[in-house]
Image (spheres, grey):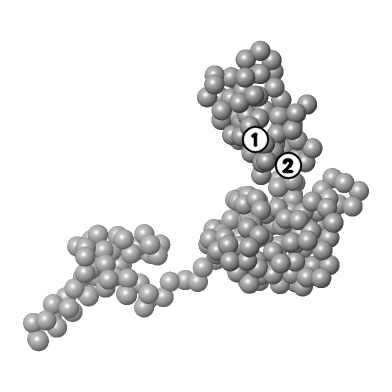
Amino acid sequence: MVPYHDHNADQMRPQLIARMATEAVALVSDAGTPLISDPGYKLVRDARAAGHTVVTIPGPCAAVAALTLAGLPTDRFLFAGFLPAKAKARSEAIAELGAIRATLVLYESGPRLGATLAALAEGLGDRDAAVTREITKRFEEAVTGTLPVLAARYADAPPKGEIVIVVGPPGAPPPTSAEDADAALIEALTRLPIAKAAGEVAKKFKLDRKELYARALTMKGEAEGDSQSG
């Protein structure tokens, strides 16, 4: 056995590819499925590029196992790995993830858990979430609650073990107001014909195109009337 990790992957990869010419090479992990949050994908990519056959044997995966414990929607989810350690970069990453309409799955360490949950609560608000740890081991635990509640619980009590945070998707967006639709139509009519303007706004706000087309005709007529009277 030889180690293959973030710190030596670039040096080890050519050696492993060379060995594949005469022997079978297996990538294994003592912490879940290989390639999930590790540099294994580069080995797979280079092995295939060198003409070697790559096969997989499915194994344990903490991200998927945590989903089964969290009791949150699983029809659509995003695995985002570890968030950045620095506060500014972490906040930016959370802002980017916040708009995604899916359950979020994150890995984290015990010492960083409190700060990460606080940042998630600040960036995502009162979403339902779960903190799972030590999955399949003796002290397996899944603690559920809103992000602010979980952030308070773990603020001064970092847990031990491997941790997965699962965050529920955002709620349904508020319905589009007539004022928002009219403003979008007015803007679109400055650069598009009536039919295309109505179509663009209908697609953006998921509204009826025929109704928007009629509204756009009225707007156009009012604007032309104003210009003639002026």
2 or 1: mark nearer the eye: 1
Residue type, mark 2 in image: Cys
Residue type, mark 1 in image: Ala
Rendering coords of residue 88 (x, y %): 58, 66
Instruction: Give the residue pinned by disc 2.
Output: 61
Q: Quadrant of residue 29?
A: top right
Residue at the right extreme of this rendering: 138
Rendering coords of residue 131 (x, y %): 76, 59
Q: Nearer the viewer, residue 184 or 6?
A: 6
Q: Is residue 210 visible?
A: no
Residue at the top extreme of this rendering: 22
At a point 53% along the width and 60% down the height, the residue shown is 96
Q: Nearer the viewer, residue 19 or 154?
A: 19
Q: Quadrant of residue 163?
A: bottom right
Disc nearer the start of the sequence (2/1): 1
Could you say whether the residue bearing mark 2 is in a helix, strand or loop? loop
The answer to whether 127 appears left or right of 224 in the picture is right
At a point 17% along the width and 78% down the height, the residue shown is 223
Rendering coords of residue 123 (x, y %): 60, 69
Instruction: Give the residue pinned by disc 1.
Output: 9
The answer to whether 106 appears left or right of 172 in the picture is right
